[in-house]
Image: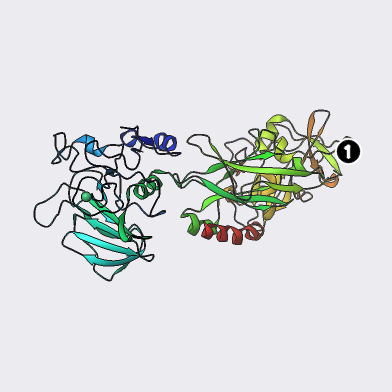
Amino acid sequence: MSGARRSLGVALAVVAMAPPAHAQEFTYHPPGDLVPGSGDGRVDEKVYVPGMLFPIEGKAYANSQVYGNGGLYGPGGGQCDAVNYSYPWRDNYCEKRSWGMPLCPSGIGHQGQDIRAETCQKDVHWSVASVDGTITSVGSYSVYLTAEDGTRHDYLHMDSVQVSVGQKVTRGTKLGRVSNNFGGTATSVHLHFNLRQNVASLGMVYVPTYLSLVKSYEATQTPPAPRGAVELFDCERIGGHAFDPENPDDALTVEIEVDGLPPTQDHRVVANRHREDLCDVLGSCKHAFLAPTPRSLFDGKPHELRFRLIDPTDGKRYELLDSPVSLTCGPVAPTAVRRPIDLASRKAWGFSAFWSELPADASSLPVGSPAPKEPLAWLDPSEPARLWVRDGDVRRELPTSRALDWNLDVEGLEAADDAVLELPAGRPLPERAELVVVDDQRFLLDSTESAPPSPPPTPTDPLGTSADSSCALASVGSSRSLTSSLGLLASIVALGLARSRKRAAAR
Ligand SMILES: [Zn+2]
């Protein structure tokens, strides 16, 4: 007896993700390797019906009924014994029978494969259509399903048959339940499954079923891999989506590798934004990512960006569709004023070297007052397309369409109250937050005119900047968990949506 085969490629993932009770790994004896003494099998690596759906829902165990536990020529025991409901599977096409079988070594044998369902209870587990086709026969315990290519799929020993002759069915349609019906005397509880196909020079014959069953069963055991796509990339925004069908509520992190260098913790964006088009395609909406194009790329040189999602269960990386992409942006010549920003403030704003820092020489720029220590922002109560950001003793205007460029989450903001609106309005904020590095110090670029008066704000701020104030603190941070879906942003991402839809349909 030769060893059992492992189900290639899927075993580790199954073991890692399934609860312990179901962790038994699917293995199978090779085709033609029958129970010793039960006949000569056909060693045949051909998959006669590639891509079919496995004909029973849930777990299943293909093995001999007659030569297994509880069988007429078996080693004893009962049909419900655990050994019958375990892997490895075993072929029993060509097992000793009196049927004429031209493809079997002895010319006679068993016409198909016997398969036990998940348990030995009868009339519980569903048999389903393995292909699209037409029901061409229904007997007292049998259903024949004929595919468009003429291959007949035979289901025997069923109960609770749900279909009738002439009925068109699609892959997955419930046909009946696995049972032990056999006309008169009952057999063991199992599905006998045949494939009858036209074979050159032989005509319509029962062909080996085993490997078609192995392949289709493997497909049911393989967890669908996480996936996603890069749908938008230019010098304004990068965006796309990432999704794990096994954990549809999880927000995945997308890692961005630049020019083949190992990504750091900063090279990440979370795919947790609501995008309407994803709802239909994925059955879950909050899986988009969108971010300002990283300022560190703005050096006028081409860069290769490789996008990979990180599977949170095992840390494995999956590259997104349409990755890598190539981008050439900038260079940008900083003008106006640079304002010192310390580490704590950079963290509070969610600024980082990768996302925020321009590779530009700003040493000749005048130094302004320190940058705001943290993002304090409010929606304008009368103008929904505008928000106000506190900068020292002034409020500064920013279009909500630019919130993303300052790591501000519009949905997390409250409306400005009178205390905010009574502050003098300064110059509008620049369109995007950009940092420069001069002598290892970080500075926030600003427009000259908007530099707030010196001295910089004191810790005893009358409006209160502490965490317990009623002011809405914009939620920022390295997660860049921005969830706005405002007009301009929507129109920017819309570019990518049509492609995403097309791709998903093609998948
Ligand atoms: Zn059988």
Q: Nearer the viewer, residue 422 or 165?
A: 165
Q: Nearer the viewer, residue 104 or 386?
A: 104
Question: What is the tally of numbered marks visible in this picture?
Answer: 1
The coloring applied to the image is rainbow
| Most distant residue in the top direction | 440
The quadrant where residue 182 appears:
bottom left
Instruction: Name the residue at 69% across, 43% down.
Output: 305
Is residue 357 toward the left or the right of residue 489 in the image? Answer: right
| Most distant residue in the right direction | 364
Quadrant where the N terminus sits is top left
The quadrant where residue 462 appears:
top right
**Does the image show residue 487?**
no
- Residue 49 position, x and y percent, is 38, 55
- Residue 198 position, x and y percent, is 35, 61
- Residue 102 position, x and y percent, is 29, 54
Q: Which amino acid type corresponds to the residue marked 1 in the rendered image?
A: Leu
Q: Nearer the viewer, residue 101 or 61?
A: 101
In the image, is the residue at mark 1 within 8 Å of ligand 1 by its beta carbon? no
Mark 1: secondary structure: loop
- Residue 399 position, x and y percent, is 70, 55
**Image vertical order of residue 139 relative to residue 420, above or below:** below
Instruction: Name the residue at 56% across, 58% down.
Output: 503
**Image vertical order of residue 88 relative to residue 227, above or below:** above
Q: Nearer the viewer, residue 237 or 171?
A: 171
| Most distant residue in the bottom direction | 166
Instruction: Name the residue at 21% across, 48% down.
Output: 190
**Image vertical order of residue 502 relative to residue 260, above or below:** below
**Does the image show residue 38?**
yes
Instruction: Name the residue at 50% across, 57% down.
Output: 281
Is residue 97 toward the left or the right of residue 90 in the image? Answer: left
List the residue tagged with mark 1.
Answer: 365
Neighbourhood count class around disc 1 (C-alpha, 10 Å): few under 14, some 14–19, many 20 upward:
some
